[in-house]
Every structure is written in structure tokens, then in C-alpha cells.
Image: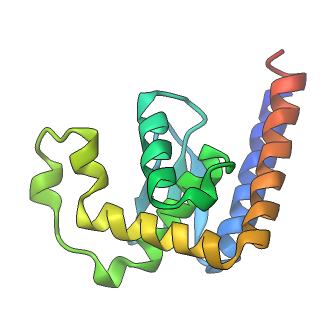
Amino acid sequence: MLQTYLNKINSTLNSMVKSFDENYSVILSDKYAVDLDNEIITYTLLVDSRNDNFYKNFVSRFPCVENFNILFLSILHEIGHLETQDEMENDTKIRNTELDEETYFNLYNERIATDYAGFWVQDNFEIAKEYNDEIEKVLFEMYDRVLD
């Protein structure tokens, strides 16, 4: 039964990312990330303190996202990396060092991805709300039926 809901979540997220570009796709993983070359976004359903801090940072910059789900915002942030990759800097050297979360969130590539996502929500609020609500519906169904 759990697999059914994981498939529903994946299908819902794939529909969302493909509305940005037909080549984009998502797969469940143990973290949020993006493979720029293959246009694959990985996501997780695991919760940790980084999620809270990412969310707080996002909301502080874009108050309009306050009532949106962390999964939706994280996927949108990763889409931001794909959509802004031509503007990205090579920050591999700094990423390979110990970074506190505030420094990480302020890396140029992270800022422009979040900016893309935040401005997209501002400009497409009703569509964003529909995607968010659809994702939450599937998540809540899973929590209620499988994890309860």
C-alpha cells in the first residue's frame, strides 16, 4: 500500500516538473538535489532540521510562500537550479568545505534558485496553490491510510 502512495506522489511531482519542461523528471531519494546534465530532481520525504531552516530562509525572503508545503517549495527550488543554470557560478570549491546553513543558503547558485522559485510563486500564485494542494492531498492520504 505504501508503494501505491509513493507512486502517486512521484506521478504528481513529475506532472508538476514537466509543466516547466517536458525533459524534467523526479525520483525519490534520500535528499533534495538536481542533476543538471540529466535534468533529474531527487527529493526526499525524510524530515530534518535543514528542512526547517530552508523553509524559514525561503519565507523570510518570500512571505507569500508561508503556507506552502516544504516538498512543493523544495521541488520548485530545484527547478530553479535547472531554469537558472546558465547564470550559475562554479562554486564546487566552496561547496566542498564545511558551510553553515546561512552561508549555504546565501551561495549565489542557491540564492538564484530560491529567487526563481519565490518569484514564480508570486507571479503564478493560483497555479502554485493548485500544485501545492495536490501534493498535500496525496501526502495526507498516505499519512492517514498507511502511516497512521
Image x and y of residue 123, in percent: 64, 79
Is residue 72 toward the left or the right of residue 15 in the image?
left
Quadrant of the frame with the N terminus: top right
**Viewport quadrant of the C terminus:** top right
The residue sitting at 53% across, 67% down in the picture is 118
Q: Is residue 57 above or below residue 1?
A: below
Q: How is the image coloured?
A: rainbow
Residue projecting furthest to the top: 148
Q: Quadrant of residue 82?
A: bottom left
Q: Is residue 139 visible?
A: yes
- Residue beneath the point at 88% across and 34% down: 141
| Residue 103, horizontal then vertical, whole percent | 21, 48
Between 14 and 135, the residue placed more toward the observer is: 135
Whole-percent x, y for residue 113 in the image: 41, 67
Along the viewing direction, whichever of 56 and 5 lies nearer the viewer = 56
Q: Is residue 76 above or below residue 140?
A: below
Left or right placement of residue 36 versus residue 120 in this view:
left
